[in-house]
Structure formats: C-alpha cells, structure tokens
Image (cartoon, rainbow, N blue to C red):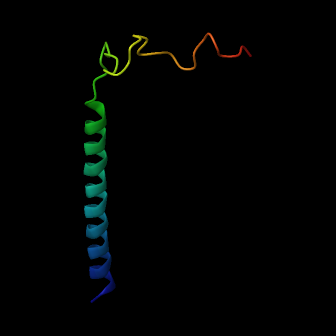
Amino acid sequence: MSDQNRLRQDYQKSRRHAGFFLVLCLLGVVLTACGKKPGHLDPPPTVTEDTFPQTYPDPATDPKP
C-alpha cells in the first residue's frame, strides 16, 4: 500500500471519529438542555414539618464572615 493511500484512509478514519464525537456532543447538549426545574416541590411524605425546600446553609445558624 502506498503512503498516499494510507494517508487518505487515516484521514477518512479521523473524519469519521470526529463526526461521531460531534454527534455525541450534540446529543449530550440536547439531553442536558431538556430538564425542567419545578416551580414548587412538595415535602417528602415522612416529614411532619413543612419546611421544604430549605436554603442551605441555614441563615440562622450560618456564622457570619
């Protein structure tokens, strides 16, 4: 096999790998962008006090800098 044919095959292989990587990245972006943040969360059924959701850390116990 000549060097020119080998270079052509390597170039085509690298383009296929780059294309696959690009499609994989685009799929990842699409999947991560489809999440929706709920406006309201219900507390877990085992909780008796309704302090859910809470801020973290609790401002009442957080030491001031």
Q: Which quadrant of the view contains residue 32?
A: top left
Residue lying at 32% horizontally and 76% vertically, measured from the top left: 7
**Horizontal and vertical percent position of residue 35:** 28, 29
Residue lying at 26% horizontally and 57% vertically, measured from the top left: 20
Q: Nearer the viewer, residue 45 or 40?
A: 45
Q: Nearer the viewer, residue 5 or 10?
A: 10
**Horizontal and vertical percent position of residue 5:** 26, 81
User: How many badges with numbers are in the image?
Assistant: 0
Q: Nearer the viewer, residue 21 or 1?
A: 21
**Horizontal and vertical percent position of residue 49:** 41, 11
Residue lying at 30% horizontally and 81% vertically, measured from the top left: 6
Q: Which quadrant of the view contains residue 44?
A: top left
The residue furthest bottom is: 1
Q: Nearer the viewer, residue 8 or 32?
A: 32
**Horizontal and vertical percent position of residue 54:** 47, 15
Image side of residue 63 versus residue 18, left or right: right
Q: Which quadrant of the view contains residue 18?
A: bottom left
Q: Quadrant of the N terminus?
A: bottom left
Residue 27 vs 8, above or below: the answer is: above
Image side of residue 48 versus residue 65, left or right: left
Q: Quadrant of the C terminus?
A: top right
Image side of residue 40 versus residue 63, left or right: left
